[in-house]
Image (cartoon, rainbow, N blue to C red):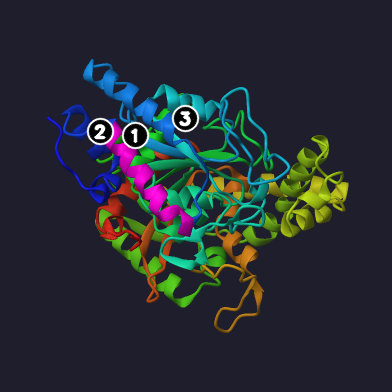
């Protein structure tokens, strides 16, 4: 028999909790979708997380899922769960803009692979989320559709480019979402919005049917409110693992937790320039994790990371320019881009072939430097971002005792290396600044080690209270 639950109670259930209530028929998928749609209607005018909401379609899917579950035809833990997709994933018959006006009327005739996989798992699509134009930015300040506002402080950015996905999850407008990550665009908004975001090993999750930024670096992955929920979504969208690499299983994360964990502390790059509050919270989180896991923390060398990451970024720029020129968008329709994306493309058009080739070599060197570290440790710890969420419109920042730099540079600095190397990385909440802004801890693992990475992240999450905190939006 169905029970009465408030909208807030329903909206902030974990996927596992919601699934148990669905199986017991104490709630229905219709209840979950109704709660999500009510929150979108009431909150999204202030947050601006969604570009397209499919209320009627979502309710139809919910009623169909309700009938299937009553007949015992459960498809798995996502069956009947409301989700959202970043607006650069193809969705058949649903507008897919990539946050641009150039694709403002584009309606795909087929689903992206991840959209098809989530539908096959029984997830219910609520709509498509706002993002940085063409995913070519890290703030989700969109000149065409407006900025995504951080739900913890509406005058601040949510992070990008998957900012709408993160803000929707953080506010309980959906249970999980999918984002893309080319330089940090899952982990940065997850960090700034106080939730969990996973960039898997390069190639594990298909980006077929996704409007690209730089195909050699693009990753697709889950954004959710907790580690177990993140694992559940990953299970639905992941492709094949190499022989001998365990697939993540949300039911076995605690059981399969490694015994003696070796934590790598990369002093040279990741801890060189941080806001004081971020440093304090991340260092405390590492100490807590070490105690919880009975782990050994050791400094690890990543001596050449800064120069290698800067050089390899030229490959990303070249790939992005190739896509926009090959589609006839740039420079033919340059006036239709926002100023920042047009500026990136104009800069990329001047890139020399020698810089591109050198960037490929530096990418290989950076990957090898990470691989060497993972022969010594199980996981590398680092901040997800060196700063908390900046204000909307803020372009420059100066940390104590440091030279002025750009918000874009700082937000990408911690996350971009793992995109270049292809290693999996997750951001998980590790506390709040005195201004009540979330801070994220980043964990980076060896390739194909998502099962271990998620188990370690869950062990840390279970020592904290952060998953139970939600933005105070009414």
Residue numbers of the magenta segment? 30-46
Q: How far is disc 3 from disc 1 in space, using C-alphas?
A: 18 Å
Residue 425 location, x and y as percent?
48, 48
Measured along the vertical axis of the image, is residue 339 above or below residue 77? below
| Dot in front, 3 or 1 | 1
Q: CB atoms at circles 2 and 1 under 8 Å apart?
A: yes
| Dot in front, 3 or 2 | 2
Q: How far is disc 3 from disc 2 in space, using C-alphas?
A: 20 Å
Read off the residue under disc 2: 19
Q: Secondary structure at mark 1?
A: loop
**Residue displayed at 44% across by 70% down:** 278
Q: In the rendered view, does 269 fall on the left or right side of 84?
A: right
Q: Earlier in the sequence, mark 3 or mark 2?
A: 2
Mark carried by residue 238: 3
Read off the residue under disc 1: 81
Q: Secondary structure at mark 2?
A: helix
Residue 205 location, x and y as percent?
52, 32
Residue 350 location, x and y as percent?
87, 53
Q: In the rendered view, does 311 fall on the left or right side of 394?
A: right
């Amino acid at each position: 028999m169905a029970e009465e639950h408030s909208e807030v109670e329903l909206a902030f259930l974990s996927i596992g909790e919601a699934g148990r209530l669905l199986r017991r028929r104490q709630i229905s998928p219709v209840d979950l979708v109704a709660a999500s749609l009510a929150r979108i209607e009431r909150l999204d005018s202030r947050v601006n997380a969604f570009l397209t909401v499919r209320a009627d379609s979502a309710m139809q899917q919910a009623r169909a899922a309700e009938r299937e579950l009553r007949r015992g035809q459960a498809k798995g833990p996502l069956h009947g769960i409301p989700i959202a997709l970043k607006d650069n994933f193809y969705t058949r018959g649903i507008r897919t803009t990539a946050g641009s006006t150039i694709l403002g009327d584009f309606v795909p005739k087929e689903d992206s692979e991840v959209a098809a996989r989530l539908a096959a798992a029984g997830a219910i699509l609520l709509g498509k989320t706002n993002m940085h134009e063409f995913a070519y930015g890290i703030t989700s300040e969109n000149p065409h559709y407006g900025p995504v506002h951080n739900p913890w402080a509406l005058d601040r950015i949510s992070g990008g480019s998957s900012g709408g996905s993160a803000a929707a999850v953080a506010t309980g407008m959906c249970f999980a979402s999918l984002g893309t990550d080319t330089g940090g665009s899952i982990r940065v908004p997850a960090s700034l919005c106080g939730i969990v975001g996973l960039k898997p090993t390069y190639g594990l999750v298909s980006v077929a049917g996704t409007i690209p930024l730089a195909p050699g670096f693009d990753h697709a992955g889950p954004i959710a409110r907790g580690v177990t929920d993140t694992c559940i979504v990953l299970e639905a969208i992941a492709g094949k693992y190499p022989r001998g690499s365990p697939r993540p299983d949300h039911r076995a994360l605690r059981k399969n937790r490694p015994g003696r964990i070796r934590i790598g502390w990369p002093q040279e790059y990741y801890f060189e320039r941080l806001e004081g509050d971020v440093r304090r919270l991340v260092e405390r989180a590492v100490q807590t994790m070490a105690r919880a896991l009975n782990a050994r923390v050791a400094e690890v060398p990543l001596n050449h990371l800064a120069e290698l990451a800067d050089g390899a970024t030229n490959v990303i720029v070249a790939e992005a320019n190739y896509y926009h020129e090959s589609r006839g968008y740039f420079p033919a329709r340059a006036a239709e881009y926002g100023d920042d994306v047009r500026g990136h493309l104009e800069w990329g058009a001047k890139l020399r072939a020698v810089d591109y080739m050198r960037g490929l070599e530096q990418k290989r060197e950076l990957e090898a430097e990470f691989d060497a570290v993972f022969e010594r440790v199980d996981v590398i710890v680092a901040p997800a971002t060196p700063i908390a969420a900046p204000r909307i419109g803020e372009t420059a920042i100066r940390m104590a005792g440091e030279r002025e730099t750009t918000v874009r540079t700082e937000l990408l600095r911690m996350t971009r290396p793992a995109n270049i190397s292809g290693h999996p990385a997750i951001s998980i909440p590790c506390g709040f600044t005195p201004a009540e802004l979330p801070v994220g801890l980043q964990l980076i693992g060896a390739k194909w080690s998502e099962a271990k990475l998620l188990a370690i992240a869950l062990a840390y999450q279970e020592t904290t209270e952060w998953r139970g905190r939600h933005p105070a939006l009414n």
